[in-house]
Amino acid sequence: MDDVISKAVEIFCQDADKSPQELVDHIAAAVGDRELAERLYEFVPIAFTRAVFESAGIVFQDSFRRVRGKGKLTHFCPLSSEPLWEPALAFARRLNSSVDHRDAMAAVLQHCGLCRAITEAGKSGANLRGSVMAGPIFLRQADMPCKPWWKIW
């Protein structure tokens, strides 16, 4: 999985000024799978944000949701149920621990709204230690990798 994450990170770096759609198109061309490219675009920036800010004492929820038709939300789904999540988070933590990869971290982080919000709050003097960040809500409709809690069969 590291190879596809690495390809996505390279594209985030090379095409930092591109639109989300252009980035997904380039990632899809590199990894050969549109659905995988969409998920890389969604989960890699979130993983990088967590890798950077968890040491600052910010708490991140371990679930995500998606918007369904008519603006309704899906059930909560553990991030760990997404096959990309753990490898993306481990990859981000490795890069974050190396001074040599700060530019790559910055390129990916600029594509995460949560990262921008945390950064702006920090600039205004807010102390975010102990703050709990809500899990991401993705606008793209896609199958959820887990069942709702009430579907136990």
Image: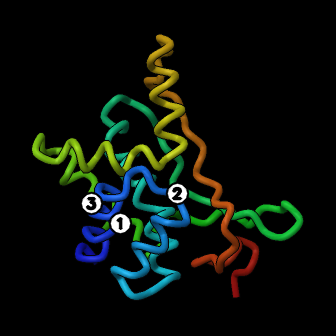
Q: Nearer the viewer, mark 1 or mark 2?
A: 2
Image position of 21 with respect to 131: above or below: below
Q: What label sits on residue 90 in the rendered view?
A: 3
Of the image marks 1 and 2, the number of the one nearer the N terminus = 2
Tell me the kind of residue under disc 1: Glu
Tell me the kind of residue under disc 2: Ser
Q: Residue at x 33, y 48 (%)?
A: 107
Q: In the rendered image, which residue does mark 2 sit on?
A: 19
Q: Residue at x 36, y 58 (%)?
A: 15
Verify CB contact (< 8 Å) between mark 1 and mark 3: yes
Residue 152 is drawn in which quadrant? bottom right
Label 1: few (<14), some (14–19) or many (≥20) C-alpha neighbours in 10 Å: some
Residue 96 is drawn in which quadrant? top left
Total count of labels = 3
Could you tell me how far apart the alpha carbons at marks 1 and 3 are, in whole angstroms?
6 Å
Image position of 149 with respect to 64: above or below: below
Secondary structure, mark 2, is: loop
Q: Residue at x 50, y 24 (%)?
A: 120
| Position in image of residue 4 (x %, y %) | 30, 76
Verify CB contact (< 8 Å) between mark 2 and mark 3: no
Q: In the rendered image, which residue does mark 1 sit on?
A: 86
Q: Is residue 99 left or right of residue 86?
A: left
Tell me the kind of residue under disc 3: Ala
Image position of 147 with respect to 123: above or below: below
Q: Nearer the viewer, mark 2 or mark 3?
A: 2
Of the image marks 2 and 3, the number of the one nearer the N terminus = 2
Question: 13 and 67: which one is in front?
Answer: 13
